[in-house]
Image (tube, helix red, strand yellow):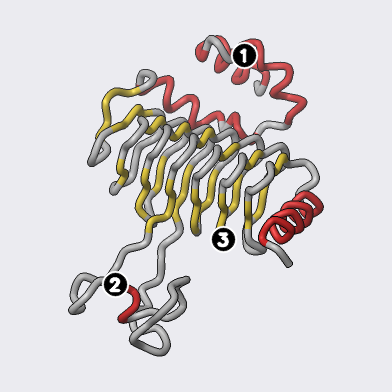
Amino acid sequence: MTKILKVFVQNMLLRRRFPRSVINNGAFADRASVLGDFSVLFRDATLVQSDLGAYSYVQSGSLICNAEIGKYCSIAGDVSIGLASHPTHFVSSSPVFYDNSQPLPKFFVSGRKYLESVPRTIIGADVWIGQGVMIKAGIKIGVGAVIGAGSIVTKDVAPYVIAAGNPCKIIRHRFSEEVVNRLLDSHWWQLSDKRLEKLAHLFLDPLRFLDELEHSRC
């Protein structure tokens, strides 16, 4: 089977598994990954042992490993999520000396000599991750956070902050503490599509949105 044909078959099988998602040519998700309804994988986006929430998208060239991505997330191109570490206490950090399961042509060992488990990375709902961001494995990024392009994230990021840089640091908060707490308490991202359709016209005004949502629950 040629490489082009193999990719075509993989895409076809993915589309059968997740008929309510959009999977562009060249995108890949392994059997351990799950795509939520109306999610999108752009060309050459890759998911490995990861869950992508409903209405979230991953743009071209991004690689996501062992991660949980919430609903309504926007992931730009060339993003890497779930970066694993190499051993630094060995003579060499090259996997040819400690892990023959890697996709490399030659090894000096048989078997795996470094068995560090890669922790799962958690990305909350409605997170926006900019172009070229790199996120270390095991990081937690809170609901509504924004990560600026080119950032390297090595520590957890709080909800509803805008953070950027190398290392990634908070630049500012998106809303006041009161509004953030109300948004988090609302769990709006868990509402049904039908409910969100009725509230969508208020998304431009967070306070009106929250007032209406809280009033309708009374």
Q: Which mark is residue 94?
A: 2
Residue 18 relative to residue 126: left or right: right
Q: Residues within 10 Å of mark 2 (few under 14, many from 20)?
A: few
User: Which residue is more in the foreground, 135 or 190?
Assistant: 135
Q: Residues within 10 Å of mark 1 (few under 14, many from 20)?
A: few
Task: Identify the mark nearer the N-term, 1 or 2.
Answer: 2
In front: label 2 or label 3: 2
Q: Residue at x 44, y 53 (%)?
A: 121
Residue position marked by numbered label 1 in the rendering = 212
* Secondary structure under the numbered disc 1 in the rendered image: helix
In front: label 3 or label 1: 3
Gap between marks 3 and 1, in whole Å? 38 Å
Residue 159 relative to residue 33: left or right: left
Residue position marked by numbered label 3 in the rendering = 49
Q: Residue at x 33, y 36 (%)?
A: 150
The quadrant of the image that shows the N terminus is: bottom right
In front: label 1 or label 2: 2
Task: Identify the mark nearer the N-term, 2 or 3.
Answer: 3
Q: Residue furthest bottom?
A: 110
